[in-house]
Image (spheres, helix red, strand yellow):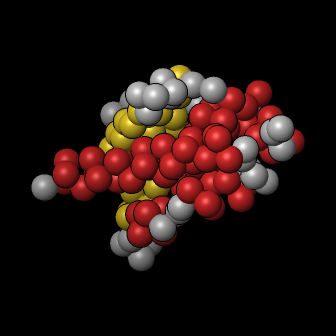
């Protein structure tokens, strides 16, 4: 049912935890299944003055797919510019995990949405 990659990210999630004094925080949930995801980002400017996600962590309450997609989105977004990170789709997350069961694809949506919310929060804090 689950790929080896999903099981790896579920049993040994990457970037799990909290960032103290984050640049932005995004939280989304699915009331139907009860999954909740929170993504923390730290943004710094690189040598070209581009805003880059220098650190990213997550806290997720949910099923194996929710935890695996949270872990994968952090891997995909780390060290990316905000513009590059905003282009990460649910399909990118699912493909990087070597597939998700159709009934669990909503988890990859939650992961991408949580990242977008963290970037949105960062931009609103800058105003």
| Residue at the extreme right of the image, as rendered | 4
- Residue 45 point in image, percent of width and height: 38, 63
Do we see residue 74 in this rendering?
Answer: no
Q: Say if 45 sits above or below 124 in the image.
A: below
State which quadrant residue 77 falls in.
Answer: bottom right
Q: Quadrant of the N terminus?
A: top right
* Residue at image coords 67%, 53%: 94
- Residue 16 point in image, percent of width and height: 59, 31
Q: From the viewer's perspective, tell me whether residue 89 is left or right of residue 64.
A: left
Q: Quadrant of the C terminus?
A: bottom left
Do we see residue 10 in this rendering?
Answer: yes
Q: Say if 76 sits above or below 110 in the image.
A: below
State which quadrant residue 39 falls in.
Answer: top left
State which quadrant residue 70 falls in.
Answer: top right
Q: From the viewer's perspective, tell me whether residue 10 is left or right of residue 57.
A: right
- Residue 99 point in image, percent of width and height: 75, 52
* Residue at image coords 34%, 48%: 117
* Residue at image coords 36%, 46%: 118
Of 27 and 3, nearer the camera is 3
| Residue at the extreme left of the image, as rendered | 127
């Amino acid at each position: 049912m689950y790929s080896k990659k999903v099981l790896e990210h579920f049993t040994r999630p990457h970037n799990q935890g909290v960032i103290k004094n984050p640049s932005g925080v995004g939280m989304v949930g699915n009331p139907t299944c009860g999954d909740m995801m929170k993504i923390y980002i730290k943004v710094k400017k690189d040598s070209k003055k581009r805003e880059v996600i220098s650190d990213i962590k997550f806290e997720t309450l949910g099923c194996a797919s929710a935890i695996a997609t949270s872990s994968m989105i952090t891997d995909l977004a780390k060290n990316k510019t905000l513009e590059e990170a905003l282009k990460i789709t649910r399909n990118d997350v699912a493909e990087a995990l070597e597939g998700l069961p159709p009934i669990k694809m909503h988890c990859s949506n939650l992961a991408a949405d949580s990242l977008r919310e963290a970037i949105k929060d960062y931009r609103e804090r800058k105003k």
